[in-house]
């Protein structure tokens, strides 16, 4: 029984060491007789584990990267930093401290990312738009070899599995410079992004970052904006619905900016501007009921986990009662002009192709009109039919003139 067990533990031992060297370069600064050994980091779970030759009453871990430092309690020779951990691309230092009645033991492990300096991507940024679409973009490192290709992996939260980008954005040389995501779920947890790279000549450094997704959302405009003016009281009620969003779906999570201009002066200064917290309606007193107005709105997060930057402006909503008569007169005029033009085109067309005799009697079922004309180009035929069927009225009208 003893021999197989020894074999198993030797295998595990070697496996651990191999993973240690492949995954990350850890410089063990432990004292030679430290009972805490074989620190191992799972970068995707952000979990540190180790082996110990002693029993301890209490143990904990800490990570330090740049100015950032955090400590978590260990459980069963394992520490989970979760998604409050710092990014690792600039290196980090991990330590495990354990206490028992014999004393306090500490092991420190320095994490040094591998690869040539300047090969990691730069200017990584992401934006969420249209409720659940996301774009992330980056630029190739300035000292990256020509053939470097980059790959993006991400986790929506530390408790999800890492996934590779499904739809890369590439540059003219076929190098990945971004990623498009669909159906992105905006969570309270921070998302973790890692972009690593490969080249046949050298090791490429990775870049990683935590992003709180709600902060990078470009909010949609408020929807269903309506303005109803009361002619007697001379005020208008603006109503809207909160922007389309897949989280924090409550009115109190938003604030709104309302902006009104004269329709005929869209570049001018707003005649009314207001910011309102929450709600879904706003009443305004009309100063000039005689002119047409353009109203637009945009939204931003207020109290909840919603992006505090202003989102997209809505398309302008028109209200006010100037020129109602003259604008309908305009529409009539345009309709008349178009009708006349169509009629003239039809006459000219029919004169040239002498289609008149064939087409006119067949108006209820014009397709048959051309059955007896084997020489006619079918495409031309199709267009004749369309002209005739869609302009029935004009044809009748015009036919009198022709006769
Ligand atoms: C304390 O150290 C002694 C000898 O160094 C060892 O035998 C003992 O198991 C240790 N106690 C604990 C709780 O590990
Ligand atoms: C640690 O504790 C377990 C039981 O809790 C015991 O079986 C084991 O021998 C202890 N190991 C050492 C090194 O003291
Ligand atoms: C890479 O840069 C780091 C600091 O930015 C420096 O400590 C290290 O020596 C550099 N490595 C090489 C190979 O130049
Ligand atoms: C990253 O952005 C900065 C500022 O826009 C720019 O100066 C720099 O050249 C960019 N980096 C790369 C690798 O293009
Ligand atoms: C937003 O998504 C919807 C449905 O996927 C699509 O119809 C619409 O064109 C998109 N709008 C923008 C601005 O991308
Ligand atoms: C996202 O990327 C696609 C493809 O490159 C682009 O067409 C779109 O405009 C981008 N959207 C945003 C908001 O950056
Ligand atoms: C977002 O919400 C819409 C409807 O509210 C739903 O159809 C869609 O599946 C949601 N998308 C995600 C990624 O949760
Ligand atoms: C990049 O990281 C992923 C996830 O850890 C890994 O599977 C992949 O092999 C890495 N690629 C390179 C080129 O290092
Ligand atoms: C806008 O109003 C229409 C009809 O009143 C309704 O069907 C639709 O769901 C509304 N849109 C939103 C985003 O609430």
Image (tube, rainbow, N blue to C red):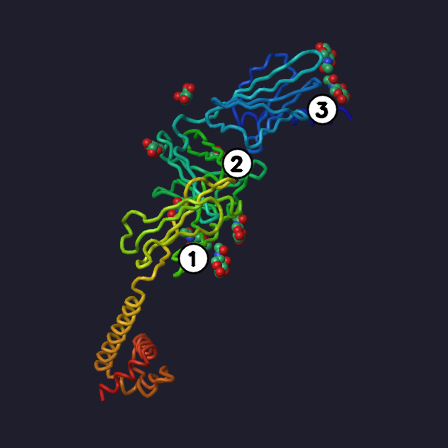
Question: Would you name the residue on which mark 3 appears?
Answer: 6
**Closer to viewer: mark 1 or mark 3:** 1
Report the image quarter containing ligand 1. top right
Instruction: Give the CA distance from mark 1 to mark 3.
Output: 77 Å
Q: Residue at x 66, y 24 (%)?
A: 77
Dot 2: element: loop
Which numbered disc, 3 or 2, marks the residue that appears first in the sequence?
Answer: 3
Question: Would you name the residue on which mark 1 appears?
Answer: 226
Q: Nearer the viewer, residue 68 or 272?
A: 272
Q: Is residue 30 above or below residue 224?
A: above
Image position of 36 (left or right of 210): right
Q: Nearer the viewer, residue 252 or 81?
A: 252
Q: For mark 3, does the 10 Å Cα neighbourhood hold few (<14), some (14 to 19), or many (20 or more) residues?
A: few
Which numbered disc, 1 or 3, marks the residue that appears first in the sequence?
Answer: 3
In the rendered image, residue 207, in percent from the top left (x then y), is placed at 45, 31
> In what quadrant of the picture does the C terminus appear?
bottom left
Q: Is residue 326 above or below residue 243?
A: below
In the rendered image, residue 236, in percent from the top left (x then y), is placed at 40, 56
Cβ(mark 2) to ligand 7 < 8 Å?
Answer: no
Instruction: Give the CA distance from mark 3 to mark 2.
Output: 42 Å
Question: Would you name the residue on which mark 2 appears?
Answer: 190
Q: Number of numbered discs present?
A: 3
> In what quadrant of the picture does the N terminus appear?
top right
Dot 1: element: strand
């Amino acid at each position: 029984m003893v021999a197989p067990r020894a074999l198993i533990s030797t295998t595990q031992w070697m496996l651990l060491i191999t993973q240690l060297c492949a995954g990350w370069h850890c410089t063990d600064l432990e004292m030679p007789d430290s009972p805490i050994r074989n620190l191992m980091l799972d970068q995707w779970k952000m979990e540190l584990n180790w082996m110990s030759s002693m029993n301890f009453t209490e143990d904990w871990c800490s990570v330090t990267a740049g100015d950032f430092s955090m400590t978590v309690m260990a459980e069963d020779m394992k520490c989970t930093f979760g998604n409050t951990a710092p990014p690792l691309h600039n290196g980090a230092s991990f330590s495990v401290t354990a206490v028992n009645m014999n004393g306090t033991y500490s092991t420190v492990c320095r994490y040094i990312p591998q690869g040539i300096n300047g090969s990691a991507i730069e200017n990584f940024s992401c934006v969420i738009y249209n409720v659940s679409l996301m774009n992330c973009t980056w630029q190739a490192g300035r000292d990256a070899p020509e053939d470097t290709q980059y790959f993006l992996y991400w986790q929506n939260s530390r408790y999800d599995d890492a996934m590779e980008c499904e739809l890369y954005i590439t540059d003219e040389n076929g190098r990945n410079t971004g990623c498009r995501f669909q159906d992105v779920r905006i969570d309270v947890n921070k998302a973790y992004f890692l972009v690593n790279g490969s080249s046949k000549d050298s090791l490429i450094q990775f870049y990683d970052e935590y992003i709180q997704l709600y902060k990078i959302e470009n909010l949609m405009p408020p929807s269903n904006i309506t303005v109803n003016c009361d002619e007697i009281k001379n005020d208008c009620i603006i109503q809207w619905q909160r922007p389309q969003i897949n989280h924090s779906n409550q009115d109190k999570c938003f604030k709104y900016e309302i902006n009104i201009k004269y329709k005929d002066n869209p570049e001018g200064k707003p005649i009314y501007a207001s910011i309102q917290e929450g709600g879904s309606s706003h009443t305004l007193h009309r100063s000039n009921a005689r002119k047409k107005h353009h109203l637009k709105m945009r939204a931003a997060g207020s109290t909840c986990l919603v992006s505090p930057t202003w989102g997209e402006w809505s398309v302008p909503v028109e209200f006010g009662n100037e020129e109602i008569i003259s604008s309908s007169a305009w529409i009539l005029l345009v309709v008349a002009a178009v009708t006349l033009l169509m009629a003239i085109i039809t006459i000219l067309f029919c004169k040239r192709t002498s289609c008149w005799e064939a087409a006119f009697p067949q108006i209820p079922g014009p397709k048959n009109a051309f059955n007896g004309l084997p020489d006619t180009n079918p495409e031309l035929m199709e267009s004749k039919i369309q002209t005739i069927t869609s302009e029935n009225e004009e044809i009748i009208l015009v036919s009198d003139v022709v006769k």
